[in-house]
Image (tube, grey):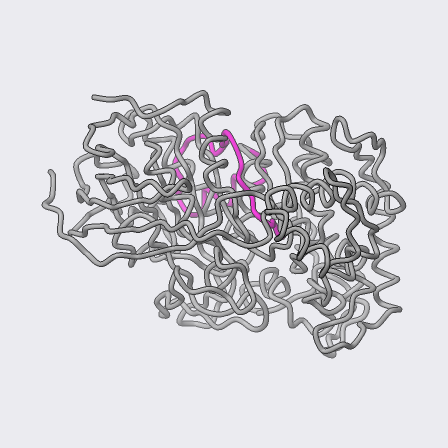
Amino acid sequence: MKHRAIKRRNVVIGIGATAGVAAVGGIALNADASTGNASGSSDGSLVFDPDAYTELTTTVTDTEGTEHSVTYHFWKAITYVSKPVDATYQSLNVSVPVEIDGTAVDASNAPILLANSVGGYMPSSVADATGVGGASMGGGAPSGAPTASASTSPTASASASAPGANGNTNATGGAMNTNQLLALAAGYVVVEPGARGRGLKNSVGEYYGSAPAVIVDLKAAVRYVRSNKGRIPGNVDRIVSAGTSAGGAVSTLLGASGDSPIYDKHLKEIGAADASDAIFAVGAWCPITDLEHADGAYEWNWGTNALSTGKQVDQTVSKDLRSQFAEYQAKLRLRGLKGSGFGTLTARNYDEYLLKQYMEPSATTCLAALSDSERETYLAKNTFITWDGEKATFTWDGFLTHVGARKKTAPAFDAFDLSAGENNEFGSTTTANRHFTAYSAKNDTTGLSTKRVESDIPELLNLMNPMYHLVEKVNGKRSKHWWIRLGTNDTDTSHVISANLAARAENLGDDVDHLYYWDQGHGANTDPGDFITWIAEVTGYKKAKKK
């Protein structure tokens, strides 16, 4: 049955419109959405009810400044597994446009944007959403000890941004709702899944959101959507995942691991639908992934940069980790992207590769978009850049100095004192934080009785790392289309993480669109309109059909 729409307040979100521009633009997405009562299927049947929606109306301003009135059907908090551990997180929302700018549209065969709001590997929920883009986070920050519990309702607003984070990120580093709103206005179906995350604790003191819960839940959400082909609007064979930070990592992992049997027992435990969990394409912004090698990659990238306090990290530790990265990178045997002029990527040539393939083109795009006076002012303040009128060039050392302070200490992800968020992510049912690399376990400073990683860690690492599915066990069911973005000033991770991902995907023959946003930090998304256009191109969908 259809429900009467009720107006609600405006929500305004500022976004940038052009990739590579140093200053984020003031384009806004205005959400003037109406609300009502919605119901979903949570009885274990896992059958989507086409009539259990609320009809809402929202105004979306696109990246060119044009306002669009979008009426859509909204299904709220549908539990996507038959045996949920916690339905507060294991549920999803569906938004389907039915009228855009006064013209009825048919989105029955439209691409489906599967947009997660995961940040810091923390839990995310759609239970309190009143419309598209309303997912929220389950408390806490992306690093440190766990703070969320099973009885804690999500408290971090999707419109709040983390301290020092780009304005496109929420309180724990996950994505804001820019992509969802633009996708809806383009005629796409938007599915927003919640997922368990680290720190969740039940009444008897057991942790139930640690790895691999987040990826198992997102796979179950995909299976729910695909199992309801013909009932849920949209083309279930054209699901495009999107996420930022840890959400970018699990978006990438979804794409890399489609239908991998290593998740089967975990999916069975929660009563996931009997369907494929493969997705068509991946959108990933600053993916925090390849965690067992992330410490080495981080030190290779930022090892000589001081912390914001001006202090250097322990250089002995930094050098040890850089050596580990060099060994790992050599074993990957990755080749540079086509046209880059680079063969095998190693620790010796990766700085030059990043400069030529990503950093200098990014700076060039930024400078070319400025007026003559703006460019002159910028270059006067940034003398490390040489500008010949058409192209920007600089050295790796100059770039590192320009970025400045590193965000994280050493090791960045598997902390010797078990204080990193990733230590919490790899905790067990009874232990909040654990080591997941041999080096950090050996150098533990918390007084653990053993200096080795626990026996279940290797399997968990495979479950959580997309590179396992792209390198060690190449997955034929993986996504073949990849949109990857990172800010050049993002010191939450290493630039080689996304570059390795892009190189491996292209080396396998996949379609890769990867670039860095100049002078942008963690969570930047300065070309969302281009992403929406890219979805149409790779899925073969031009626009919503008129009724």
Image position, residue 221 (x, y; %): 41, 42
Q: Residue 38 lies in magenta, yes or no? A: no
Tell whether 162 sits left or right of 286: left
Tell whether 77 sits left or right of 18: left
Q: Residue at x 49, y 49 (%)?
A: 16
Position of the C terminus, as image quadrant, is top left
Q: Quadrant of residue 490?
A: bottom right
Given residues 7 and 382, the one toward you in this image is 382
Image position, residue 31 (x, y; %): 29, 51
Relative to residue 541, is residue 413 depicted above or below?
Answer: below
Image position, residue 395 (x, y; %): 84, 51
Tell whether 446 sits left or right of 83: right
Image position, residue 70 (x, y; %): 25, 39
Given residues 137 and 512, the one toward you in this image is 512
Q: Which residues are magenta?
A: 260-288
Q: Residue 267 lies in magenta, yes or no? A: yes
Q: Residue at x 71, y 41 (%)?
A: 358
Relative to residue 363, is residue 473 depicted above or below?
Answer: above
Q: Quadrant of residue 484?
A: top right
Residue 354 visible in the shown view: no
Position of the N terminus, as image quadrant, is top left
